[in-house]
Image (tube, grey):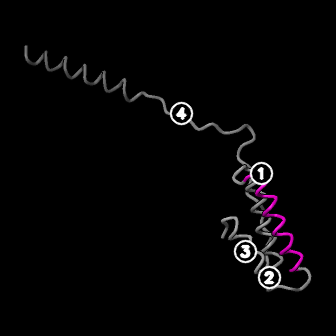
């Protein structure tokens, strides 16, 4: 009698455990096009490639909506000023403008 009662209890516990282990895990929803490709960053040294890399990152952040479009436009305007200084041969000024813009918008 005790053995049959123990078997019933074990069957009930196993059945209950089977019900709980079959809970479904939801897969994350991925847009049809998939995630955007990471930006291709310019290579090289000097102020020109540094500014170009930052502009590419900002454009990517705006495209993925990680950065508000209006903020991205202001950031890019600051980067254009840095790029103008760089192309005029004022590398120190360009790097200073780049550092100030990155700091202002929370980029490293």
The Cα atoms of the two marked residues, 2 and 1, are separated by 26 Å
Residue 75, located in which quarter of the rendered image?
bottom right
The Cα atoms of the two marked residues, 4 and 2, are separated by 47 Å
Q: Are marks 4 and 2 in contact (CB under 8 Å)?
A: no
Image point (70%, 64%), residue name: 105
The Cα atoms of the two marked residues, 4 and 3, are separated by 44 Å
Viewer-nearest residue: 69 or 19 = 69
Q: Which residue is mark 3?
A: 100
Query: Residue 103: x percent and y percent?
Result: 68, 71
Q: Inspect the magenta stretch and tell me whether residue 34 lies in it.
A: no
Query: Closer to the N terminus: mark 1 or mark 3?
Result: 1
Q: Is residue 29 above or below residue 46?
A: above
Q: Which residue is mark 2?
A: 46
Q: Closer to the observer: label 2 or label 3?
A: 3
Viewer-nearest residue: 11 or 38 = 38
The Cα atoms of the two marked residues, 1 and 3, are separated by 23 Å
Residue 84, located in which quarter of the rendered image?
bottom right
Image point (71%, 70%), residue name: 102
- In magenta, the rendered stretch is 68-86
Q: Is residue 8 left or right of residue 23?
A: left
Image point (80%, 61%), residue name: 74
Q: Is residue 48 left or right of residue 99?
A: right
Q: Is residue 59 left or right of residue 103?
A: right
Q: Which residue is mark 1?
A: 63
Q: Are marks 2 and 3 in contact (CB under 8 Å)?
A: no
């Amino acid at each position: 009698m005790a053995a049959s009662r123990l078997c019933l209890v074990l069957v009930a516990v196993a059945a209950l455990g089977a019900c709980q282990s079959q809970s479904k895990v939801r897969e994350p929803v991925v847009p049809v096009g998939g995630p955007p490709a990471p930006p291709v960053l310019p290579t090289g040294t000097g102020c020109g490639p540094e500014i170009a890399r930052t502009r590419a990152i900002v454009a990517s952040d705006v495209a993925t909506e990680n950065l508000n479009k209006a903020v991205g436009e202001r950031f890019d305007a600051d980067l254009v000023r840095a790029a103008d200084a760089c192309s005029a041969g004022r590398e120190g000024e360009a790097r200073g403008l780049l550092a100030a813009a990155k700091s202002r918008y929370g980029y490293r």
